[in-house]
Image (spheres, rainbow, N blue to C red):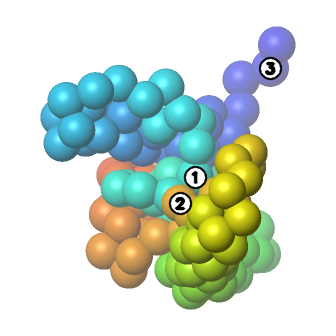
Amino acid sequence: MIYNPILCAGILGWGAAQVIKFILFLVQNKSMKLERLYGSGGMPSSHSSMVCATLISTGRSSGWNSAAFAIMFVIAAIIMYDAANVRLEAGKHAKQLNEIMEKLFSQDGEARETQFKELLGHTPLQVVCGAILGIFIGAVMPL
């Protein structure tokens, strides 16, 4: 297998954020939730960590004035904006829909089998923390 340091930095950025999410959940809730190792949402943003690690590695490898870095910058900005805005709002909507559905089903006496996933997006702080983690990984990853 060919070693691609830019791809490895991105994967490491994602993995590091997911492990941190898992540990934070464990400490805060005193229970393990394996979904925190691969699921979206939470602190820090693994999407932000991944794209920022890839962004910085691309800049270091291809040059800060390269087309590859410019493209990666635009992609990173879109992903982080989406995480902190669009997906965060979708999660809020899911929470409200779940509450509405719970009230409707409780009136009918029926059990509700599924719920909408509420933990989709990130707060701006979660995005910033993920970005800082990714920038660090991208800066120290050997090329």
In this picture, residue 87 sits left or right of residue 129:
right
First-in-chain label (3 vs 2): 3
- Amino acid tagged 3: Ile
Crowding at dot 2, Cα within 10 Å, few <14 / some 14-19 / many 20+, comes out as some
Residue at numbered disc 3: 2
Seen from the viewer's position, the closer of residues 15 and 63 is 15
Q: Which quadrant holds the C terminus?
A: top right
Label disc, if present, on residue 40 of the rendered structure:
1
Image coords of residue 53 (percent x, y): 51, 53
Image coords of residue 25 (percent x, y): 29, 40
Q: Nearer the viewer, mark 2 or mark 1?
A: 2
Residue at numbered disc 2: 119
- Amino acid tagged 1: Ser
Q: Secondary structure at mark 1?
A: loop
First-in-chain label (3 vs 1): 3
Seen from the viewer's position, the closer of residues 143 and 23 is 23
Seen from the viewer's position, the closer of residues 94 and 82 is 94
Using the rendered view, name the quadrant where residue 96 is placed: bottom right
The reply to whether dot 2 and dot 1 touch (C-beta < 8 Å) is: yes
